[in-house]
Structures are given as C-alpha cells and as structure tokens.
Amino acid sequence: MSTNIENCRIKTVTSRIVEIAGFLYLLSHPDSRKSIAAQAYDIRKKLPPELLEILGYLAQLKFSGFEIIEFILKSKIYDDLSDLEYGIAKWNHAPFLHIFFGQEIPEQRIEEALQNTGALDSLQPDFPWIADKIDCLRFIISNPDRFRAGLSALLKQLDNAFLTDTMNQLAPLYQEKMAYIHTQLQTKTPLDLAQEIMGKKFKRVNDYKEYIFIPSYFFPLRPVRFMDDYTQILIDPIPEPDSLNGDRKRTIDTMKAIADPTRFEILNLILKEPLYGKQIAEKLNLSTPTISHHLDVLKAVDLITEERIQNIKYFSTSPGRINRFLTTLRKHLLQK
C-alpha cells in the first residue's frame, strides 16, 4: 500500500510512559538489560507481596505488562503517567481488558467472561494463544479491580527519580537513535522505514495518518509496533552500549556466517523477497536439509527473520538488519 506523505503526520519522540512500561517488563526479565539489572532486582526485591503477585501474572503475558502501551494509541499521552491513568480509569473493565489484550478478544466475549469466568474456556478454540495463559487470564478476569489497582501501583513505583536520572544519562543514545530515524525518513516513507526496522513486510497495513517512532532503552526485545486505523507506533529498542562496544564475539560470529558463499547467496535472495526453504534450495540447486542448516546459522546471528504463513515458514532479511550489523562492525573496527 502506498503512503500519502503529504497527508500524514510523522513524529520521532522519546516517551517516559514507554520507558516505564519497558521497565515493568524488566522486572520480570532483569537480565535482559545487564546495565540496569541490579536496579531491576533491587526494585523487585522491595515490592510488597501483593504487587509481586500481580507481577507474576503479568510475566505470563506476551510482553509482561508492556501491553499498557496499547493505551497510548487511545490517549496520545506519551509522558505524563498521571494523565494516562486518569484517562484509563474512565474505562469500564470490558473495554479496558479488550485493549490490554491487544484487541484480539472481542469486547462482548470479555464481558461474558466477566459475568461468568467459565466462559473463558469457550474462548480457547477461537483464540488458541490463550491456552498457556489461561491461569493469568482467569485471575485478571476474576479480579479486575484488584488487577487494575496492582498494575497502577506498579507503574507508579517505576515513575520515580531513578527513571528520570537514567533517562537523562541515556540522552545521547536517545538522540543518536532519533537522528538516525530522522535521516532515514529523508529518503524513505515512514511505512517503508517501519518495515525495514522490523525486518519484514507487514501484512496488516493501513493508510495511517500518523506515524510515531519511539526509541526505547528499557524495552530490550525486538522492535514492536502498535496500531489502530489512524496511528502506527513503532518502538525501536536501543542496544546497550556494551553490546555495541564490547561484544566482539557476536560480530565475529556474524562475519563467519556470511563468509560462507552459500549463506551469502541466501542473504542476496531473501533480501529481494521472502522465500521458503524449498524455493531457496531450488534456486541454489542444493538439498533442502542443506539449506535448513544454513538458515539456522543465519538465524543464530540474527541476520534473518522467520514468519509462518499457514504451514509454510518464509525467511527474509532487510537492508536495515544488514546495516545494523555493518554499524556494529564499524564501531568495533574504528574503536580507539
């Protein structure tokens, strides 16, 4: 789908609320950000039992509570937690949970489950992803007031001086990431850039009127996007400084991976279009098991992505993914 740049709004911003939500994720996965793992462990250790219980249920969700970002789409509030909470407090339980669960479960079905938790079991055939989260969802739907109060208390606990001081210290990293995005937007549409950052072509797109790019240090996973019919928000994690300046082994492993002629050719092929294993094997006149081995090597160094469509796995890469490796390589080679 083409993007009408003249009629859309494009912003690159930092967001305190995104970082609060990211740190909420870190409370369940503290070792994913080694530079602030000690602070995450310390804050977690000081949580009262009732909040640790809430945190335990959040940890079972896909993004461990980072789902609160869905409400930025509705409120367009990026920095003031109290303003965001004031807006969220007006929502009844069913629409709140509908948004919190990524708008995947219809509001009416959630309302039925709120009235009778036994209705949760009827959701599983239609939403198979909830099977391994059923205990978490049962708690949330059985105790919506308690859950929302606990989530609010956790967010307030993180909205403190530590976060302010750390964000101030990280200001150069935020600025570097935003400058890079701004430069890329001079020659690329926001949709194309978002797909490049994510490392794949989107199947769900719209003629968005607003594109928001938000760098995040505290959310350490891959880039994620949240969208409605009007706005797309893309959250792009900032690598830890140590991962750029000290982790030379991973860079060497990546160079070894692409030094193999077959793997180099695979990258050339899937840079042009997503392909599945048999297609790659036919194009390179090799066996499918041989190609599978090479794909595993490339996945191990994070040069390719895999997306399942029905029962077929498609593999792809992007200029952005290759450029991130080249940026890291330059930093290692030019480091004084």
Image (spheres, rainbow, N blue to C red):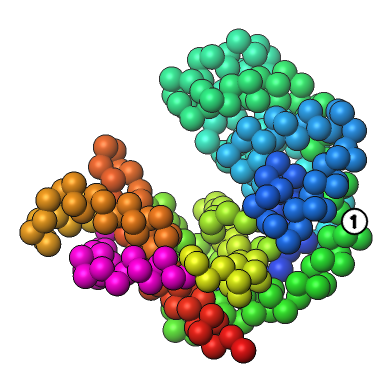
Locate residue 138 relative to residue 283 in the image: left or right.
right
Q: Secondary structure at mark 1?
A: loop
> Is residue 76 something that shows in the picture?
no
User: Of 187 and 319, which appears nearest the observer?
Assistant: 319
User: Of 335 and 106, which appears nearest the observer?
Assistant: 335
> Is residue 97 something that shows in the picture?
yes
83 shown above or below 123: below
Q: What residue sits right under mark 1 in the picture? A: 160
12 shown above or below 43: below
Question: Does residue 319 show up magenta in the picture?
Answer: no
Q: Quarter-wise, where is residue 134 in the image?
A: top right
308 shown above or below 285: above
x, y percentage for residue 307? 35, 48
The quarter of the image holding the N terminus is bottom left
Q: Amino acid at mark 1?
A: Asn
x, y percentage for residue 96? 70, 36
Q: Which residues are magenta?
A: 251-274
User: Of helix, strand and loop, which mostly describes the magenta segment?
Assistant: helix
Locate residue 154 relative to residue 201 in the image: left or right.
right
